[in-house]
Amino acid sequence: MHKILFLIFFISVGAFAQKEMTPTEAVALKAKVKTRADATTTVLSEFTQYKHLDFLSDDIVSQGKLAFKVPNLVKWEYTKPFAYSVLFKNETLFINDDGNKSNMDVGSNKIFKQLNQLITASIRGDMFNDDEFNIKYFKINDSSLVYFLPKDEQFSKFIKAFHLSFNANGDVTEVKMIEPSDDYTQIKFTDRVVNKNLSDAVFTQ
Amino acid sequence: MRFLLNSLCFFLLLGCASYPVQNGFESKSDSSQETSNPYFANAEKDYVYKAKIDAFNKSFGGIFIVKKLGPEHHRIAFSTEIGNTIFDFTFEGDDFKVNRILKELDRKILINILKRDFKALIQEQSPVKNHFSLKNDDILQTDILSKKHYFHYTNNQLNKIVRADRNKEKVDFSFTNIDGQFAKEIEIAHHNFKLHIALKAFK
């Protein structure tokens, strides 16, 4: 019995072990994701968000829908456990907090501007910018995991690292934003639909 | 003329009268030893609220989190809905520590306001200085961070805390939609400047 358990443990560890990619593999992944991102005009996806704080017993879970349209229209719509949506449009952040609407000009705010660019890039997966990030590539079976460590000192005080997971097709399946304290927000995407015709009405508040 | 002077004196006296006198509280002799606030007292529970903050004509939302980590030891954090931490404080006994605060909000005056408010919100027990009654309510007066606080109880259930400075009501903490020892809705309203925090429990 012990042997079987030991074997199962070993197989599980083996199955989830992440290995650093060779430079050739990393180049191939970048090319695959870039091709995929270039061919993507819209994305619709469900998401589940886990906010992890070390001192809490459980992660804080919320759910919602994401809509993206090229070049940079992004709407996060939380439906559970509260109604809240945030729309990035023309350098403005439009917020609808359970019917209370407000907006914020983020054009002048460097952090928000960067965050917006990153969110857009991370949905498409295309954030392989060596000027802005130190990037590390890993493979887990047929999927990939990429660490993006912001080089900008001010930004890294806000978010220490982004971890993006890609499936074999080069689609982003998970985004993890890690704070300097090591607390993190993990967003898992499911039911992703690419290139469905999305009218601009979707991107209103 | 005498009537006018009398009236003026009356209003002046009333104006200077203490908060209990102004509000018609009756003094009670049987004094409870300690105030009690059970709403953040369960160390097994993660207290998670959707927050709406109106501050100085700006309105923004977020997630307000309280966790009891031990006797007189709480952690309080606030994050955006998307998950970025805005501030994270530790209260332990008389100590207060800022674990993290967004650079834009790192102002001593703001941190002090939040410290005072949250200390009053989570303080489970505090020695009673005076005991009053008003209709069916029991009101216990205590000091929190050297300010007078009045704990209002109806049928032994805490439904309001008022911070009063001299004779004026400065801050109101109201607890509603109470389920056992869990307040599902909480409002913190400041009367001397525009700050209003409304909390609604996640579940």
Image (cartoon, grey):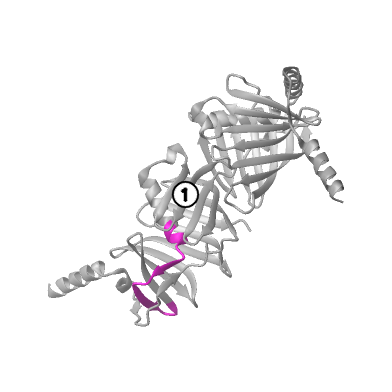
Q: Is residue A65 left or right of residue B114?
A: right
**In terms of depth relative to the viewer, which is nearer, B32 or B71?**
B71
- Image x and y of residue A135, in percent: 64, 24
The residue that disc 1 covers is: B89
Q: Which stretch did the figure color magenta?
A: B119-137
Above-or-below relation of B156 to B94: below
Quarter of the image containing the C terminus of chain B? bottom right
Query: Toward which corner of the image does residue B93 lie, by quadrant?
Result: bottom left
Q: Is residue B50 left or right of residue A8?
A: left
Above-or-below relation of B187 to A160: below
> Which residue shows up at 51% across the image and 37% down it?
A104
- Image x and y of residue A204, in percent: 63, 38
Report the label total.
1
Q: Which amino acid type corresponds to the residue marked 1 in the rendered image?
A: Phe
Query: Toward which corner of the image does residue B106 lie, by quadrant?
Result: top left
- Image x and y of residue A186, in percent: 66, 41
| Chain designation of label 1 | B
Quarter of the image containing the N terminus of chain B? bottom left
**In terms of depth relative to the viewer, which is nearer, A132 or B150?**
A132
Q: Secondary structure at mark 1?
A: strand
